[in-house]
Amino acid sequence: MMDQEVFNQALLFALKAHNGVTRKATTTPFILHPLEVATIVASMTSSQETMAAALLHDTVEDADISLEDIREKFGDKIALLVASETENKRRDILPEDSWQIRKEESLDLLHYTDSHDVKILWLADKLSNMRSFYRMYVEKGNSMWVDFHQQDPAKQGWYYKKVLEYTSELAHTAAYQEYRYLVYKVFGEE
């Protein structure tokens, strides 16, 4: 598959996978999040595979798609990138009870990866989240967290600040600078 074709196929796949789904605590169509993540990724790399992974990054967690489905359709590299963004949801435990362990496992992967593309994808995803958080924070303050599995803003802040630390090799990018700014606007200064 040619690079542009991979991106186009990923776009169609993500549109179908997220059809009818909205973002948590909003009525916004979910597909806008992966589109925004792909746009942020495109500001940091020209890799069509990384952009395609951005479009697909939530399909395994949220759309009943397997990593094997991604691998078969899009290849090993995209599957590995999607896997880096896929938490073990532990369906036998309430999400609020598994939140800390899921975040620690994910952060371990990010911290120890040598993959520049993984860090780009993570930064783009979390920047998209922080943009949404900031909009909610301006309207609701810390009461916004009642709509999340983790309702403690200090724990949310710990997670997003760790992502900031673990993606610091991207500090030269506008995406990182915006992410840093938003993290400290929502969760407090250093």
Image (spheres, helix red, strand yellow):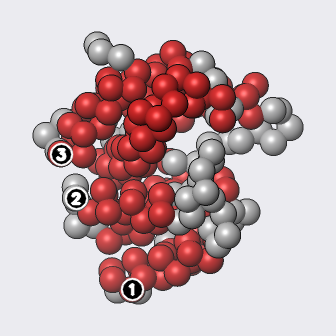
Instruction: List the residue tagged with mark 3.
Output: 174
- Dot placed on the residue nearer the N-terminal end, 1 or 2: 1
- Dot placed on the residue nearer the N-terminal end, 2 or 3: 2
Which residue appears farthest toward the right when viewing the image? Answer: 92
Residue 28 appears left or right of 186: right
Instruction: List the residue tagged with mark 2.
Output: 43
Instruction: List the residue tagged with mark 1.
Output: 5
Q: Position of residue 52 (x, y in %)?
A: 42, 69
Asked if residue 177 shows in the view, the reply is yes
Q: State the SS at label 2.
A: loop
Q: Nearer the viewer, mark 3 or mark 1?
A: 3
Q: State the SS at label 3.
A: helix
The quadrant in which the N terminus is found is bottom left
Which residue appears farthest toward the left when viewing the image? Answer: 172
Q: Nearer the viewer, mark 1 or mark 2?
A: 2
Query: Which amino acid does the dot numbered 1 rest on?
Result: Glu
